[in-house]
Amino acid sequence: MSSIPAIQSAYQGIQSGMQSMNKNAFAVASESTKGGDFVTPMVNMNSDKLQVQASAKALQISSDTLGSLLDIKV
């Protein structure tokens, strides 16, 4: 894993969003079989998706910036 804080934060954001997505997907599956409320976990899954997308974009920008800095240095 990289020691660059922006890249570490992006990876953590992706991991956190995916873990929450899995938790909410399980909640949707279990509540839909019980006939319970599965709307809240569905809304949370949308938030999780946005978190993962934002973190992936931050990772891409950090990687591009690092690449540009290395190109300039070399």
Image: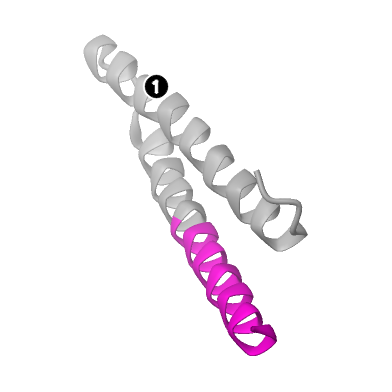
The chosen color scheme is one colour
Which span of residues is magenta-colored?
Answer: 53-74
Task: Determine which residue is flagged by label 1.
Answer: 27
Q: Residue 54 at what x, y percent from top left?
A: 51, 63
Q: Residue 74 at what x, y percent from top left?
A: 64, 83
Identify which residue is drawn at 63% across, 73% down.
66
Closest to the observer: 27 or 60? 60
Q: Residue 12 at what x, y percent from top left?
A: 63, 44
2 displayed left or right of 50: right
Quadrant of residue 34 in the image? top left
Q: State whether the magenta stretch is mostly helix, strand or loop.
A: helix
Q: Residue furthest front?
A: 74
Identify which residue is drawn at 64% across, 89% down.
72
4 displayed left or right of 50: right
41 displayed left or right of 70: left
2, above or below 61, in the image: above
Q: Residue 32 at what x, y percent from top left?
A: 25, 20
Q: Residue furthest top?
A: 34
11, above or below 54, in the image: above
67, above or below 23, in the image: below
- The verdict on residue 27 being magenta is no
Closest to the observer: 21 or 58? 58
Closest to the observer: 48 or 14? 14
Which quarter of the rendered picture does the N terminus lie within?
top right
Identify which residue is drawn at 54% across, 74% down.
61
The amino acid on which the numbered mark 1 sits, given as a three-letter code, is: Ala
Mark 1, secondary structure of its residue: helix
Identify which residue is drawn at 58% across, 39% down.
16
Q: Residues within 10 Å of mark 1 (few under 14, many from 20)?
A: some
